[in-house]
Each structure stands twice: as structure tokens, then as C-alpha cells.
Amino acid sequence: MVKARSTPDMLLLGSTMMLLVIGIVMVYSASAVLAFREFGDSFYYLKRQALFAVLGVVAMLFTMNVDYWVWKKYAKLALLVCLVLLVAVLIPGIGVVRGGARSWLGIGAFGIQPSEFMKMGMIIFLSKWLSEQQGTITLFKQGLLPPLGLVGLAFGLIMLQPDLGTGAVLVGASLLIIYTAGARLLHLSYLGLVGLVGFVGLIIAAPYRLKRITAFLDPWQDPLGAGYQAIQSLYAIGPGGLVGLGLGMSRQKYSYLPEPQTDFIFSIIAEELGFIGGTFVLILFTLLLWRGMRTAITAPDTFGSLLATGIVGMIAVQVIINIGVVIGMFPVTGITLPLISAGGSSLTLMLTSIGVLLNISRYSR
């Protein structure tokens, strides 16, 4: 192995920390009214976000200083544990239902989402597997189908919760790793058509998903039902204008926009900080993703390159889906904005993953 650099990629670290600070500030601004009404404490979500941010930063510093190839040794065990947790969360009495999905393990207000762990577990395992099977990835049956079957199994378990947003991020990051490892684009195109048919089947099988699609096409058909979130999100973004209404001055957070501190926090950013504030956040994400891809390209070995690619893909897909939903480009799906939305396991796991990416950057050529 190449000797580690004394410091990680500081632009990657700096953009991560700036996004985290913006997230803490905006979580308080977006949630103060809701927190006071529900818990009698305006700082409820702020305190939770700060707690998990501290835990996440500690985890990031740990993984940043642990040689990334160590995770290769535990790839199989990590994936097995994640699969067991995904099965356990589906068992009544063990899994906790929140927001209509059985996605949580825990007690009371604290819990973990196994699907969040699965995203990173799958990225590590695929990076190990494909770095060792580069000669067969161009073959359809021997090289491509086995990893896709594994991704399909994890996706199926996540959809039983159901959690389409997290499942989409898992599939997106996994396909990016598989393509980067050398899979033939023609094979992936054929499978993409099969996946499209399956996606249509998922929509037909669940009426609420079909309502989300119709609401996406024309939210005003059902302004108080399926189209409500999309409309209220646009009501938040529109008045923001160039410079916004001012920090803390959002009107939509007063019980108009659902989940202002999680799925739709970018709407509040646009409303309070305007086009300039929203663009600044997007620039920080672009900087983070650029430095992440640079790390993947300059990694000293195939495992490190694929691992970095998967982490960057996970972040990129999640950002694209979240902001796409907020501005009306995609149907509404429950997915958080990385590093900014209120979250427990999602925030902690994201910072842990970025720590791994930072460690890889210490070995970049």
C-alpha cells in the first residue's frame, strides 16, 4: 500500500462541515414551531440534531483514521448483519412503524433504520466482490447477475417496509459501482428495461404510489391530498426570491408544509435564504461530490476506487432525488437531504461514510 498522506482532502472535509453547520441551523429554524407545538420545547429537534451531529463527527474522525482496506475484511459480515436487520425490522413487535413504514428498530424516540446501514454495507461488499472479480464482470450470467441478484434481494426487503426512496438510493449507488467495475452498458440497458417494468408493477401494486405519480403530473387535481406536499413546497420556494424572507422568517413552517425539518428542508432554505442561499448549498454539494470523485479516480487500488465511487454515488443520488422532489421534478418520496435534514441514523451513517471517503483521499496518487 502507498504510505498515507498526513492530511485528508481538506476541501472535501470543509464542504462536509459547512453543510453540517447549515443543517443544524436550518433544522432549528424549520422545526422550532413544530417542536414547541408537539413537545413544548422549541429546541427539541435542534438538540437531537446536535447530538447526532456530534456522534457522526466522532464516527467520521474514527473512520477517517482507519485504513480503508480494513473494511474489506469485514465486508461479508457487515452485509450479513445488515440483511438480518432488514428481516428483523419486518417482524411485528420488533420493527417500529413510523410514517406508515416499518423501517425502524428501537425504543421510543430513539431508533435505527437498518436500510441506512444496508446502503453502506452493500457498497463495501460490492467494492470487495467486484475488485476481486474484474475478469468476469463483462459476462452476463457469471459476472453481472450475482451482484445484481444480491442488490435485488436487499431492495426487495426494503420495499417490504416499504421505503422506495432508500431503495432507489441503494440501487443507484450499486449500479454505479457495477458500471465502474466494468459491466457492459448493453447488459445494464437490458436490465434497465426489466427494472422499468418492475417499477411500473410496484406503482400499480400500491395505490398510494399511483396517486403520487398523478399528483406529480398535476398536483392541483388533489390539492388537499396527494398533491398537498408538492404544492406547499412550491409555495415556500416561490416567495423566497433572490435573497429570501430572512433566517427564521418562513411562513410555510407554520403547519403548512409537512416535514419541514426533514424531507422538505430545502424548501425552507429557499424560502428563508432565497435563490442565493439555495445555490450556495448546491455549490457545497457539488464541491463535495467533485472532491469525492477525484478521490475515486486517484485511489491507489480498485477496491478503494469502487468504495469511493459508491459513497459518492450514494450522496449524489440522495441529493438529486430530494431536491428533485422539492422543486417538483420528481414524485414525492420520503428521503432526506444528506447532512442537512434532521435525522439520527441517517446523519450518523452519512458522516461515517464520508470519513471512509476522507481516508481513501489520504492515499490518493
Image: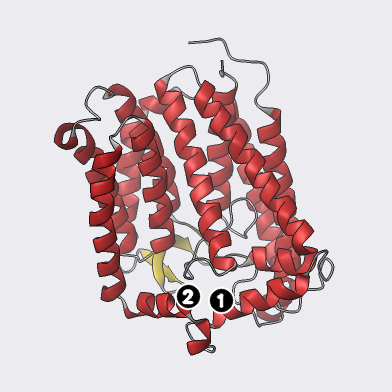
Q: Nearer the viewer, residue 146 or 158?
A: 146
Q: Which mark is residue 218?
A: none
Which residue is found at the position 39% from the left and 32% from the top?
Answer: 180
Where does residue 236 sit, x and y in percent of width and height?
69, 75
28 lies above or below 128: below
- Using the image as rendered, state which of residue 10 and residue 181 is in the foreground: 181
Instruction: Give the residue type that dot 2 points to.
Output: Phe
Which residue is located at x 71 percent, y 59 percent? Answer: 47
Toward which corner of the image does residue 324 lie, by quadrant?
bottom right
- Res. 88 visible in picture: no
Visible in this render: residue 122?
yes
Image coordinates for residue 208, horizontal then vertical, percent: 37, 79
Q: Which residue is mark 1?
A: 230
Mark 1 Cα-neighbour bin, 10 Å: few <14, some 14–19, many ≥20: many
12 relative to 335, above or below = above
In the picture, the disc for residue 216 is 2
Q: Could you tell whether 316 is left or right of 38 in the image?
A: left
Q: Secondary structure at mark 1?
A: helix
- Rounded to the nearest whole Å, what is the CA distance between mark 1 and mark 2? 8 Å
Frontmost of labels 1 and 2 is 2
Here the colouring is: secondary structure
Expressed as whole percent of the image width and height from the top left, the position of residue 322 reads 55, 60
Above or below, 179 against 276 in this view is above
- Dot 1 or dot 2: first in sequence order is 2
Task: Mark 1 and mark 2 in contact? Answer it, CB < 8 Å.
Answer: yes
The residue drawn where x is 72% and y is 63% is 269
Task: Name the residue type under label 1.
Answer: Ala
**Mark 2 Cα shell of 10 Å, populated few (<14), some (14-19), many (≥20):** many
| Quadrant of res 358 | top right
Considering the image in quadrants, where does the C terminus appear?
A: top right
Mark 2 residue element: helix
